[in-house]
Amino acid sequence: MVWTESSNAPDGAGEQRVVRVTHPFHPLRGQEFEFVARRNNWGEDRVCFHDERGELKSLPTAWTDVVEPDPFVVMAAGRSPFRIQDLLALADVLASLRP
């Protein structure tokens, strides 16, 4: 998997950066945390941060503002909760469950 350095990474000047949880159904949505690193853990691109208790946590980068938002989601502006590729994948799963 190819991934790039985070735009939220510390710039070396001692400035601390934050990461915001953006996943619409995550209980931490909208909260900001101290950014630590961006890593490929467990086969996926993840962002590491310190939570409110100072514990190191990680989330998929797609659930945060570390990555640019999906263009479809931006253009849909809340009018369509599902992307076509996700609906097609769901249809494949449902078809495989039919006897």
Image: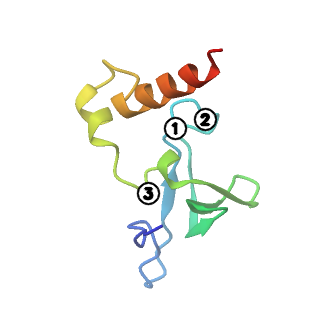
Q: Position of residue 16 (x, y in %)?
A: 50, 70
Real-space Cα separation, disc 1 to disc 2, in angstroms: 5 Å
Real-space Cα separation, disc 2 to disc 3, in angstroms: 16 Å
Q: Residue at x 55, y 37 (%)?
A: 29
The answer to which image quadrant residue 71 occupies is: top left
The answer to which image quadrant residue 7 occupies is: bottom left
Q: Is residue 99 above or below residue 44?
A: above
> Residue 26 shows which numbered tag?
2
Label 2 CA crowd tier, 10 Å (few <14, some 14–19, many 20+):
few
Q: Residue at x 27, y 26 (%)?
A: 76
Q: Residue at x 51, y 38 (%)?
A: 23
Query: How is this picture coloured?
Result: rainbow
Helix, strand or loop at mark 1: loop
Q: Which residue is mark 3?
A: 66
Q: Nearer the viewer, residue 53 or 25?
A: 25
Q: Position of residue 18 (x, y in %)?
A: 50, 59
Q: Position of residue 15 (x, y in %)?
A: 46, 75
Q: Point out the image quarter for the C terminus.
A: top right
The reply, left or right, for residue 27 in relation to residue 71 is right
On the question of residue 84 being in view, the answer is: yes
On the question of residue 37 being in view, the answer is: no
Q: Are marks 1 and 2 in contact (CB under 8 Å)?
A: yes
The reply, left or right, for residue 9 in relation to residue 46 is left
Total numbered labels? 3
Dot 1 amino acid type: His
Q: Which residue is mark 1?
A: 23
Q: Is residue 95 above or below residue 70?
A: above
The answer to which image quadrant residue 47 occupies is: bottom right
